[in-house]
Amino acid sequence: MRIKEAIKISRQHGLPDLEAHIIIQFISGKTKEFIIAHPNFEIDDEKFMELIEKRKTGYPIQYIVKGKEFYKNWFYIEEGVLIPRQETELLVEIAIQYIKKYRLEKIAEIGVGSGAIIISILLETQTIGYGTDILEKALEITKLNAKRLNVEDRLYLRKGSFLEPFKDIYYDLELIVSNPPYVKNNAILPPEVCWEPKEALYGGKDGLEFYRNFLNKYDLSGKIVMLEIGHDQGGFFRKLGWNVEKDYSGNDRIVIFNGRR
Ligand code: SAM
Ligand code: GLN
């Protein structure tokens, strides 16, 4: 079918044109500009209909086209890792500021997922990264993105919980970042989120389980720690004396412990 017919069909199925464009880009390998300029260009009918049907079930567009733009780069993603969220870019921005201010060299991330956070930081700084995840798939995808974006030689990845796999060098780590699972177990999430790994999302009854376990496990003296939190979890950290930063929507989003001061 022609591109213009494909867009008409996707409208009839209730999908925004933007998503039709993303799907057409994916199956044709053409740019967005080409697609807009060539409405009569023929694309694969069967493939298009298959992906439209899949999208209609609520399956995330980012899993269909296997990618997501995050911070300054495009990251490869697939089912089995969390789709990086825009609000998480704030964690990257603040981390880069601290790295520059304190000239930090060794940074760790707990729960790398697709690698979006730690790879974005490595690309903007001259640091060495240490990443963990409990999911093998996450380490696989992070490694692939690190190769694609040429930071493979500065990123060490090990499978395991928290920073246990890097116990041997824990003392040397200067900055620890994480966007951990913080959704309450009984939270009602948008239908698209149910395709994402539950290990990436759920943080126990009140969503704070990861944070409590982390704080019980590690001595943070001398370190800087930066964590993403849910919009209603700032109070827990304010009581501990941490700084709480709001995201662009005005929600509490990043908490910071500064053991350097
Ligand atoms: N950093 C990625 C991002 O921001 O897009 C993924 C974040 S996702 C919310 C949380 C990640 O942490 C998942 O990949 C999950 O498998 C991992 N994870 C959950 N609990 C963990 C733990 N105790 N230790 C290490 N990784 C963990
Ligand atoms: N922000 C994600 C969501 O609301 C949750 C990610 C997380 O738990 N870290 O779906």
Image: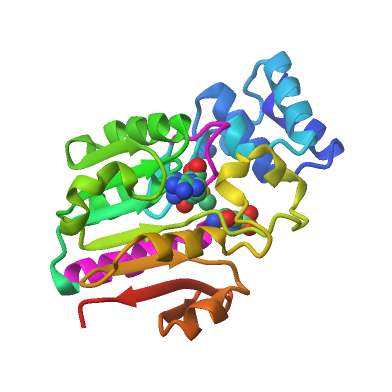
Q: Is residue 97 magenta?
A: yes
Q: In the picture, residue 157 is in which quadrant?
A: top left
Query: Is 123 rendered above or below residue 222?
Result: above
Q: Residue furthest right?
A: 12
Can residue 213 be seen by looking at this rendering? yes
In the image, farthest residue toward the front: 216
Front residue (pair 194, 239): 239
Q: Which residues are magenta?
A: 76-100
Residue at figure coordinates x 51%, y 63% from the top left:
87
Q: Is there any visible trace of residue 38 in the rendered image?
A: no
Question: Going 57% across and 64% down the picture, which residue do you hit?
Answer: 208
Q: x%, y% of residue 176?
A: 31, 60
Query: Which residue occupies the foreground of this view, 17 or 184?
Result: 184
What's the residue at 60%, 56% (across, down)? 203
Residue at (45% x, 42% y) in the render: 113
Residue 261 in the magenta stretch? The answer is: no
Question: Is residue 250 found left or right of 162 in the rendered image?
Answer: right
- Residue 139 is left or right of residue 190, and the answer is left
Q: Where ligand 2 lies, by image quadrant? A: bottom right
Q: Position of residue 61 (x, y in %)?
A: 64, 38
Q: Is residue 16 above or below residue 54?
A: below
* Figure coloring: rainbow
Percent of width and height locating residue 133: 42, 41
